[in-house]
Structures are given as C-alpha cells and as structure tokens.
Amino acid sequence: MNASFHLPPHDPARLVNGLSVDVEDWFQVGAFENVIARDAWDTLKTRVEDNVHRVIDLFAEADVKATFFTLGWVAGRHPAMIRRIVDAGHEIASHGYDHARVFTFTPAEFAEDIARARAIIEDCAGVAVTGYRAPSFSIDHRTPWAFDILAEQGYAYSSSVAPVVHDHYGWPEAPRFAFRPLADSPLIEIPVTTAMLGGRRVAAGGGGFFRVLPYAFSRWAIRQVNREEARPAVFYFHPWEVDPDQPRVGHAPVRSRLRHYTGLARMAGKLRELVGEFAWGRMDDLAAIEALRTVDFAGCSEVVA
C-alpha cells in the first residue's frame, strides 16, 4: 500500500483536523438494523459506556479534543458518561435519537426526532448542543429539507454528508468541503473527508474504511487534504470499534458481519498512531474556521462570511 500512494510532504504547521466519535452501542449500528429490533435494545447488555471511557482515555494520552455525536437514546441511559465527555473538554453534539436514517422520516418526524435527542443530551450534559450528524450520513439528495429544519432549530453546523458513491449512503454531487446549504441561514455543512485517487473521490474519513485498509491509506489521504487542498480533514469512528470482545451477531448477513467485525483488534493501536501523527480538535471549533470559506452548494460560488 505504501508504494501505491504518493505522500505529500507533511506540513510542520499541521492544520487542525476535526476528530469525531459517533456514540452508539454495538447493537445500534446500520449493519444490524434489520436483525436487531429497536424494542429489543433494552434487553441487551450495553457496552457503550466502558468503550467511551476507553476513547476518552486514549484522547487524553494524546492531549487532543474531539466531538462526540451522541444518540439521545444512549445519553438518556448513560448521563454520567455524558458528563465525563463534557468535563474532559470535548464537545457533545447530536446524532439523533435512535439511529433512524433521515430518509425514513417525514420532515415533521425528523423535527421531532432531533428536538427530542437534543433535549435529552442537553439535560444530561448541562451545555448547549449546536452540532448534528445524521445517522449513517443520511442527509443526501433525497433529504435536503433536513437542513431547513436544522436551521429552524438553531443548529450552527451539521456533519451529515458523505460526498461519495456508497451502497449505504452518499451524495456524490455535494461539495467535498464545507458548504452553506441554505441561502438565508448561517448553518454550514462539513462533509466527512474524501480524497482524490485516479480522478475519483474515495471515502477517507474513518469508520470501516479505517479499520479495514492499511494505516498508510489514511495517512496518505489526510496529508493530501491538508497539504494539497490546504483544508482540514474530518475523521470519525464509533466506540464499539475499540471493543474486539463485543458480542457476535451470528444471524446477521455475512457481508454485515465482515463490515462490522473486521479490524476491531487493531483499531485502538491505529487510532493512537493517527491522533499522534496529526493535529486534531473539536468540530465546533473547526466549523467556526470553515465558515469563513464555505461555498454555496447550488452555485458553488464563494460565500463571504
């Protein structure tokens, strides 16, 4: 893999990239949404709190701050965990209530979902929630109306678009970097990172791609974005990805099991290498900087902030 990618020189100044954690438990993931019913969740052994504590400790070792996009369902059951996230200096943000994808809602249902999640998270955290990430990056060409609702509810930013082709999600026509989806709102969207390989966009923002592919790929992609594009990368992962001892869902489809379980044992070590090699920060801080050079999605013209 090292021989396959040209690595731009690492910039000593190091742009501060956005580090994020999508807080959901092992049974709440998209890979198992058709085999583990929501009404069974409360009967399953939760592992999210221990895993989040491991992540917080890992970040403390590297002295980095991050954003934890958290499900309202999880926050309501683990308020002490939410307080520890905030007390450690990390941003708490919304991941919706129970990981339902945006395109499964009507606009009214979506408004209710994000309002419910925000109320629970803010009650647990004792701080305001200004950021949102859609479950499975499910704001796409089918659901642009979601931005209007986020703006109406006062969100400052979203990080809900994956500007690639993917079998589970993706909005390949969307800009690769921060954009304003609404002409009459300061709301900005910060897509998860993609890199350019052979003239094509490739997903390079974390998750399963980070677990499955060699670390050299992520290093190459982040350096490309930082050095050649002079933009920060946006990286994400889940607490269950640092938990190789989690239960196995044997009745899930083979493809889903491969996606979910591959690379779990190596994940913590790769994360330590990543957070040590690059500069990282919270998504709200990144949003404040990126707001100065967003583009308008419709016209792709520079917006003066």
Image: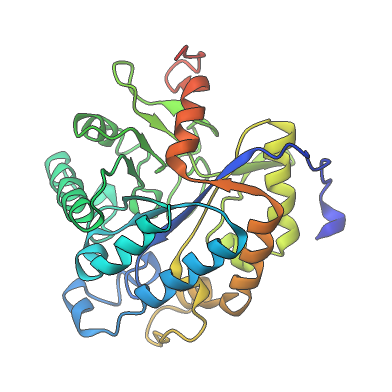
Identify the residue shown where x is 21% and y is 58%: 124
Whether residue 57 is visible here, answered yes or no, is: yes
Depth check: 66 or 106 in front? 66
The picture places residue 2, in percent across and down from the top left corner, at 83, 58
Q: Is residue 24 left or right of residue 126?
A: right
List x then y, in percent, for residue 43: 20, 84
Quarter of the C terminus within the rendering: top left
| Quadrant of the drawing holding the N terminus | bottom right
Residue 18 rendering spot, x and y as whole percentages: 53, 45
Colouring scheme, one of rainbow, by chain, secondary structure, one colour: rainbow
Q: Residue at x 74, y 41 (%)?
A: 198
Q: Residue 212's quadrant in the figure?
A: bottom right
- Tell me what residue is drawn at x 30 percent, y 21 percent: 185
Q: Where residue 227 appears, x then y in whole percent?
A: 74, 35
User: In the shown orientation, is residue 170 left or right of residue 193?
Assistant: left
Q: Residue at x 72, y 65 (%)?
A: 214
Nearer the observer, 301 or 57:
57
Q: Which residue lies most toward the front here? A: 87
Q: Residue furthest right?
A: 3
